[in-house]
Image (cartoon, rainbow, N blue to C red):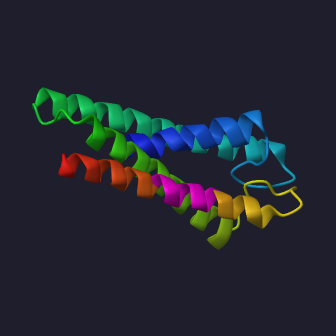
Amino acid sequence: MILGLGLLGAIDGIVFHQLLQWHHMVLSDNIQLEIFTDGLFTALFSAKLLWGGVKIFQDARKNQLGYSWRIFLGGIFIGGGAFNLVEGIVDHHILQVHRVKPLAENPLMYDLAFLAIGALLVVIGFMIKRLEQNA
C-alpha cells in the first residue's frame, strides 16, 4: 500500500502539477510559493516510494515477502486509491488549497472524477486481493 500511495502521488505531481500544469499544491499569486509547495509534495511522495522499497527489502530479508503478485498489486491499487481519496477530500474539499483543474468550466466535475478514480482503484485493489483468497 505504501508504494501505491507514493506511486499515485508521483503520477499526480508529474501529470497534474508539471506536465498539464493544471494546479499547484497551493493556489497563490506567488509562483515561488506554488513551486515550493510542489517541491514539498514531491519530497513527500518520494519518501513514500523509498519507504515502500525499504519495506519490501526488509520483508524479503526476513523471508516474509510472500509470493503473491495479486496481494502485491492489490495493495498498490488500494494505496493509490487511498491517496486520491485522502488528497481529494482533504486538499480539494476540506482545506480547499487547490482544485484538480481550477480554471475549467466546471472544476467540481474534475474534483469528483478524481475521487471516483480513487474509489475505483480501492475497489479494484480489494477485488484483486479477493481473487487471491479464492484461488
Residue 77 horizontal/vertical position (percent):
42, 47
Figure check: 110 above or below 55: below
Is there any visible trace of residue 24 in the rendered image?
Answer: yes
Q: Is 130 drawn above or below residue 46 in the view shown?
A: below
Residue at 64%, 56% (x, y): give it: 114
Q: Which residues are magenta?
A: 114-121
Residue at image location 76% in from the left, 49% down from the top: 23
Query: Horizontal placement of 25 versus 41: left or right?
Result: right
Q: Position of residue 61 (x, y in %)?
A: 14, 27
Tell me if residue 110 comes above or below residue 56 in the rendering.
below
**Quadrant of the image occupied by residue 10:** top right
Left/right placement of residue 21 relative to residue 113 reads right
Q: Nearer the viewer, residue 71 or 56?
A: 71
Q: Is residue 98 visible?
A: no
Where on the picture, by quarter, is residue 16?
top right
Residue at image x 42%, y 35%? Answer: 49
Of residues 41 and 112, the one drawn nearer to the viewer in this rendering: 112
Looking at the figure, which quarter contains the C terminus?
A: top left
> Which residue is at 28% across, 35% downward?
69
Query: Could you tell whether 7 is left or right of 37 in the image?
Result: left
